[in-house]
Amino acid sequence: MSCDAKNIPRAKIRRLVSLLKGKKYIVYTKPYQVNMVGVRNKGTNPTKFDDKMYVFWKNDKNIWKGREYAMTTDPSTIYLKDPMNKVATPVLPNGQYVDAWKLGKHRGQYTALVQRKSFCVYRDYNRNAWIDFNVEDKTCGKFGINIHRAKPNGADDGKGNTDNIELYSAGCQVLQNYYCFTDELIPMLEKQQQLYGNDDFTYTLIDKWLTNQFMWKYSIYAASVATALGFIGYGWWLIYKKAK
């Protein structure tokens, strides 16, 4: 069995590169040096692998290549309700995490990307089935937020895909397909390590869900301000009319 991921068109890779550069993020351009970009879906669902990971690199002819993988960037409902850390479940914020992971063993079991640097996370404190958090409230440290896979081998559909997140994410970044992770992503990272002697890997998360929340709150705020200004303007008009 092999990975059934999609190739990323070069036009889309160029858009991703422009997006990263627009945010002043690092873009790796040496041959076979990997860029990993997770995109959290606008309508995030803590039971499904509804997010994307875009992995792209330049080959030895200076041509962009890339693959698109299904993943989750969210903790599952199980851990939202019953956190492994009894304080609250972590949610990785959007941003670029430079050299924050290295190749190691996820829970001592198989090769994955394990957290090597401290960084800050949101916490979901209310223990219901949906993700919500205060963007002003972060905790920082090494929480074992790894980049790994879900179920092994053929998983639920015989093609390596896991149907539901369930026990496979307590805040980690998790690929849905076993073969894509084991037979594609890990060998790419090992190749980079062999070429450049560097055990540090960077991951970038683009959070469309959070952007959507900000836009929604901004729209409500703007509408409230516009309504208030309208009432003020109407009041001044009435005063002006009476004065005449």
Image (cartoon, helix red, strand yellow):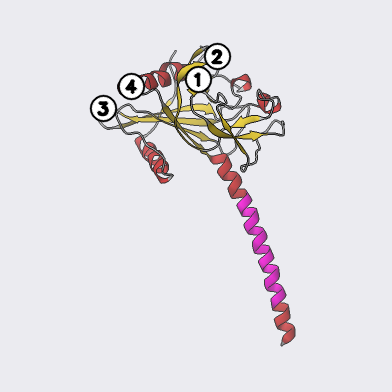
The residue wearing badge 4 is 197
How far separated are the C-alphas under marks 4 and 3?
17 Å
**Amino acid marked by disc 4:** Gly
Name which of mark 4 and mark 3 comes first in the sequence: 3
Q: Secondary structure at mark 3?
A: loop
Query: Few, some or many C-alpha atoms within 10 Å of disc 3 (few <14, some 14-19, many ≥20)?
Result: few
Return the residue nearer the eye: 192 or 53. 192
Q: Which residues are magenta?
A: 217-236
- For residue 235: magenta? yes
Q: Quadrant of residue 27?
A: top left
Label number found at residue 217: none
Query: Few, some or many C-alpha atoms within 10 Å of disc 2 (few <14, some 14-19, many ≥20)?
Result: some
Residue drawn at (70%, 30%) of the image: 129
**Amino acid marked by disc 3:** Asp
Task: Report if the CB atoms under discs 2 and 1 are less than 8 Å apart.
Answer: yes
Above or below 231: residue 49: above
Above or below 138: residue 194: above
**Amino acid marked by disc 2:** Ala
The residue wearing badge 1 is 177
Name which of mark 2 and mark 4 comes first in the sequence: 2
**Amino acid marked by disc 1:** Asn
Residue drawn at (73%, 86%) of the image: 243
- Across and down, in percent, residue 216 comes to 62, 49
